[in-house]
Image (cartoon, rainbow, N blue to C red):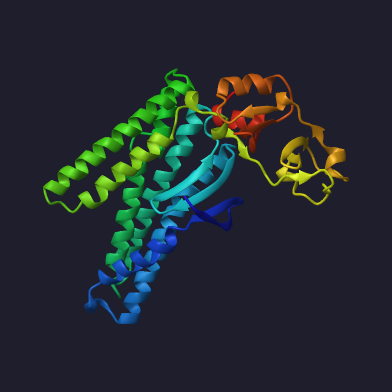
Amino acid sequence: MPSIPAGRLLGVPLRIGVSWLVIIPIVGIALFAGIPIATGSTGGRIAVAAGGTLLLFVSVIVHEVGHLVAARRRDVPVGGIRVFLLGGYSDLALDSVTPRTEIVVAAAGPITSAILALVVGGVGLLIPDVGGLHRTAGVVVLVNVAIAMGNLLPGLPLDGGRVVRGMLRSAGWSIRRAERGATWLGLAMGVLLTIAGFVLAVMGRAASMVVAPAGMVLILLATGTRPLAAKRAADVMRPAGEALGETDPVSGLDPAGFPVPVVRGTKVVGLVLAPGAGLAGELMVPVTPGDLVDADCDLEELARRLADGSRPLLVVERGRLVGILEMADLQRVAGIA
């Protein structure tokens, strides 16, 4: 899903889905249209609708901040946060943590949304109903309750699915088996919601406008959450950065971008493993056929290849370099010690 960088939030990269450029004006117009004219002036109602729209957007971010704060307290790496049309996603390295930590971090998001709903609801009761403030606050409360309850559905990739996976791991299941079980639960939840939505539509219930699409989206997301046993190099690699020519200088490059591939024409001939002063051709480590791995290579084979040496693997697809893979990447995704 296309997204644009929006700076950093509590030290981690934040990206905003371009879908919000479409949804924000729609939500604002809908909120304004729902405010009775008698509750205030046009300017006041516009201000309330704009504030409500902003608060709804912030609600999605606050949910992810709940995950982020809990992860930080338990030393769980966070790669970044993405906010898109139907919610958000925190890049949390939960596959290699204890089951208890996984449960706590996963549950923190819905709990934070529930707390926000209580705060907004409490403030709404204390302030006068000017410009439709009460109605708008009620919408924000309902949305946050929906975010909390929806994310607690017991199936991956939802937070509830992560909680279930942690519980299954606590019960002695392997991480592969627990992920597989939680993923199937996610698919089941999606199918049930979709069926319920169509039934509600036949009955003429307005809720079908939300329930059925939510179920179909959950099916798509759960289908994309492939069990670890089915993952391949393309699923766990880091995208290859811009390659250097042999005569290109290495100094001045971002240290976080290493290792950097070195090419001769279109062929990868080496890797510069760390920053240094000099040309790429002088500092590179030559690439051998053993350093290359196909994008379809499974995790078991990747673990064996990476355990045989300390050098990164270059992931290729149809002869083209597409990514770089180190043991740390595999540990982050699969929890391989």
Lateral position of residue 245 relative to residue 304, left or right: right
Residue 13 visible within the image: yes
**Residue at screen point 45% across, 42% down:** 108
Q: State which quadrant residue 111 falls in.
A: top left
| Quadrant where the image shows the C terminus | top right
Q: Which quadrant holds residue 257?
A: top right
The answer to whether 303 is drawn above or below residue 202 in the figure is above
Decide which of 202, 115 is in the foreground and name it: 202
Answer with left or right where residue 127 lies relative to residue 269.
left
Image side of residue 249 versus residue 88, left or right: right
Frontmost residue, 132 versus 304: 304
The residue positioned 48% from the left and 29% from the top of the image is 100
Residue 109, given in percent of the width and then of the height, sits at 43, 44
Give coordinates of residue 208: x percent, y percent.
Answer: 21, 49
Location of residue 309 (image quadrant): top right
Image coords of residue 290 (percent x, y): 71, 23
Residue nearest the viewer, comparing 69 with 238: 238
Position in image of residue 20 (x %, y %): 43, 60
On screen, residue 60 above or below 134: above
